Amino acid sequence: MISYFPAIYPDELVYSWFCRYYVHSGFFSSKSAMQELYCKRSDNPSKEFIGNLNPGAVEQIAKMYPLDKLVLEHTMYPQYARFISLEQKKTALYRLGHDNCDAHHLFCVLPRSEGEHYLRFCPLCVNEDRETCGETYWHRKHQIRNMGICTKHRCRLVESSVPAKSEQGFVFCPAEHYTGCDKVVFEEDPQMIQFANYLESVFDAPMDFENDTPISSVLYHGMCQTKYLKPSGRSRYTKQLTDDLNGFYRDMGLYTIASMYQIQRVLLGSRSDFSVVCQVAFFLGMMPEELTSPTLTPEQVQQEQDSHYMKDTAPVDWVQLDTDTAPILEAVIRGVYDGTASESGRPERVSERLVYREMGLLGHQLENMPMCQAIFERYTESYPENWARKIIWAYQRLRAQGKPFYWSDIRKLSGVKKKNFQSIIPYLVNHTDDNMVNQIIALVATDT
Ligand SMILES: [Zn+2]
């Protein structure tokens, strides 16, 4: 029975609040605190969101704070959901608070770069928290992607040893125990300070639950009058924009600079990643309000929608398009194939449908693009072959954790069913050594 919940601090992550609950309630272990809160251990506990709480915990928590408020003010929702469509935004708010949904099903969670793998803290906020609250806690704003400094103290954030990903050995790690007394490094670069303030303003702005202006339209109009949009408004110079943007941010030392592929997807409206949108908008000199409460007219939105060159009725220069698209496509496909494109890291099968969707192509257009077609064919594989790669990936990942594991663990991670195993065996040898193949076969054989 849940007895006591401390009050949640401003901008505190729900995860951090639960960590303090664990400490204050005197639980013997993090595991027993988790059992009090969550449904089962195999559920999706979360560091950036709330996780699958059991009915008792939900009841207690809802008495203190409405769940919508918790999602809005104490999870990373304002980052991930900021630029998705209105409908998705509403669904995500509901499902994160009431439906215990895994966030990965609701919006895109980009892979993390160097500097973003662990929860971050500001050494000066730690001191301040201890003075005012008697303890420190995990702040949301320090976890925003590409946030390198504390905007309040203008010093660099420090990485703790607590993984930011939820699924990696989930335990409660209270900030109080994981924030050492580090040397304070003040940020000197005025542009970096400005960029951090920009991210904060966009993150902090009230979520818009009325307007449904696509972020691709907002950026399109931010590009008007720049050299990145043809005066006719018909084509975007994405390569030029990417090159200039990369030069601009390289000196600032961001964790992740948006790739051409990511920028293209945002401009074409198939994605709306917070980090990519903010980088483009800040680079173009747009105000945070232009992103968070856009004032475009329906005509302006239509103008952008009409501008997608893939949908143009004008003849397409296929050779040029093929040449421009090939390097982007290669990066997309490789990321999907080897798993680096997703936070889970699981290698996926590259399908034609995926290529069309990701690149914003229309029916049969790939046939006009021999370079792109060749890249796609190079990565094409059968389902059994893809299953084999998924199993090997899961096996390696479980082995790296150093604990005993079984076929059921591999099945859960890889999503591959045992009934398909016979068709998979011949492909295992193509992707790993005999020793591992035998170990995998042995695990399947001993599964009951
Ligand atoms: Zn600070």
Image (cartoon, rainbow, N blue to C red):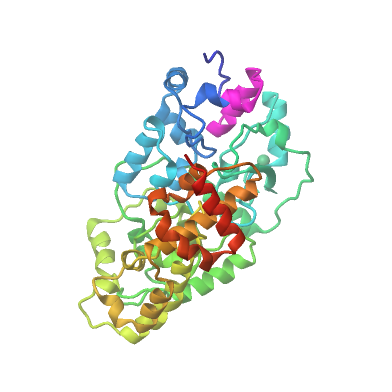
Seen from the viewer's position, the closer of residues 18 and 416 is 416
Q: Is residue 27 above or below residue 433?
A: above
Q: Which residues are magenta?
A: 10-33
- Ligand 1: quadrant of the figure: top right
Magenta stretch: includes residue 232: no
Q: Is residue 448 above or below residue 293?
A: above
Quadrant of the rendered image containing residue 3: top right
Instruction: Estimate the x, y position of residue 443 in percent, counting from the top left.
Output: 54, 48
Instruction: Give the prevailing secondary structure in the magenta stretch.
Output: helix
Identified at 35% across, 81% down, the residue is: 321
Number of marks in the rendered image? 0
Seen from the viewer's position, the closer of residues 59 and 305 is 59
Quadrant of the rendered image containing residue 215: bottom left
Magenta stretch: includes residue 11: yes
Identified at 30% across, 75% down, the residue is: 234
Instruction: Estimate the x, y position of residue 200 in percent, counting from the top left.
Output: 53, 46
Residue 281 visible, this angle: no
Seen from the viewer's position, the closer of residues 360 and 341 is 341
Instruction: Estimate the x, y position of residue 54 in percent, counting from the top left.
Output: 44, 24
Say whether residue 137 is left or right of residue 108.
right
Say whether residue 266 is left or right of residue 409.
left
Identified at 51% across, 35% down, the residue is: 45
Residue with the most extreme left position: 313
Say whether residue 64 is left or right of residue 315.
right
Instruction: Estimate the x, y position of residue 167 in percent, counting from the top left.
Output: 54, 42
Q: Is residue 373 above or below residue 411?
A: below
Residue 137 visible, this angle: yes
Quadrant of the rendered image containing residue 112: bottom right
